Every structure is written in structure tokens, then in C-alpha cells.
Amino acid sequence: MTSQSNLSLSVLLCVTLLAAVSSSSLAQSGLNGGKPIITYNTYGPLPTIKTQTPPSFPGGEDKLNAFVLWQIEEAETSLKLGRKTWLTATLDGTGKVTELVPTYDSDPTLKKEVAEVVTSMPRWNPGTINGKGVETKFQFLLRR
């Protein structure tokens, strides 16, 4: 009887170890488009489910595009933007934009003007994990 319980315990340990190893190899980093990410908890009986939500600008990306373009056009220095410019926004856990930088362009005038847009930018809906706001980065395409 002892050998049978040892065998079942061994099988249970193997299955748990297999689940832990396979889940770590499939682990995904960063935001997953709001889809739940399942993480296996090897020291407890139940898996922990983490839901993630990406940050969003109030009104959507079209409103974000219009807001940034309007702010840049109102700037004191004349600035030539390309047809498409990628920007990266860094948001804190409350949805406040702490940094806005061009992703690929190294033009110092563009960097300065985009950095000034941060002061007038409204709060976003923050990125969340399990309902709590987290610091996130959000890349978007500024189209003219």
C-alpha cells in the first residue's frame, strides 16, 4: 500500500513539474492585449490568473493623434514633421504621462516640442494588472 501511495505521489509531482516547466517556456512578457495570462503556482494548489489591460487615451487613438498634432502646431518653433512619426509615451500607475519621446527620430527640436506636450496632456486610462495601475510604455504612430 505504501508503494502505491509513493507511486501516485511521484506521478503527481511529475505532472506538477511538467506544468511548471511548460508554462515558463510559454511565458509572455509585457502587455498581452488584455488577454489573461495564466501563471502556474508550483507551491500552491490553484493557478494564479493575471489579467492585463493596456493604457488608453480618453477618446481613442484618433483623439490622441489630433491632440498631439494640435499641440505641436501651436508650438512657438516651426517644426517639420514627417508623414509618419512614432512616439513612445511612458505612463505611471495613475495614467499621468511622465515622458513622451520620438521613438526613432533624433531631431533635437522634435524631442523638445514633444517633451513639452507632456505638460498639457490629460490623464490616460492607466495600464493595469489585476485591477491595479502599473507603469507602462505605449508606442503610437503620429499620422499627418
Image (cartoon, helix red, strand yellow):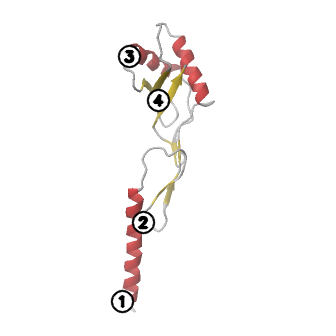
Q: Secondary structure at mark 2?
A: helix
**Mark 4 = which residue?**
89
Label 3 vs label 2: CA separation?
49 Å
**Disc 1 vs disc 2: which is toward the camera?**
2
> In the image, residue 135 lies at what x, y percent?
45, 38
Ranked by sequence position, the earlier of labels 1 and 2 is: 1
Quadrant holding the N terminus: bottom left
Q: Secondary structure at mark 4?
A: strand
**Mark 2 = which residue?**
19
What type is the residue that disc 1 sits on?
A: Ser
Q: Residue furthest front?
A: 83
**Disc 2 vs disc 4: which is toward the camera?**
2
> Is 58 positioned to the left or the right of 78 in the image?
right
Q: Are marks 4 and 3 in contact (CB under 8 Å)?
A: no
Q: Secondary structure at mark 3?
A: loop
What type is the residue that disc 2 sits on?
A: Ala
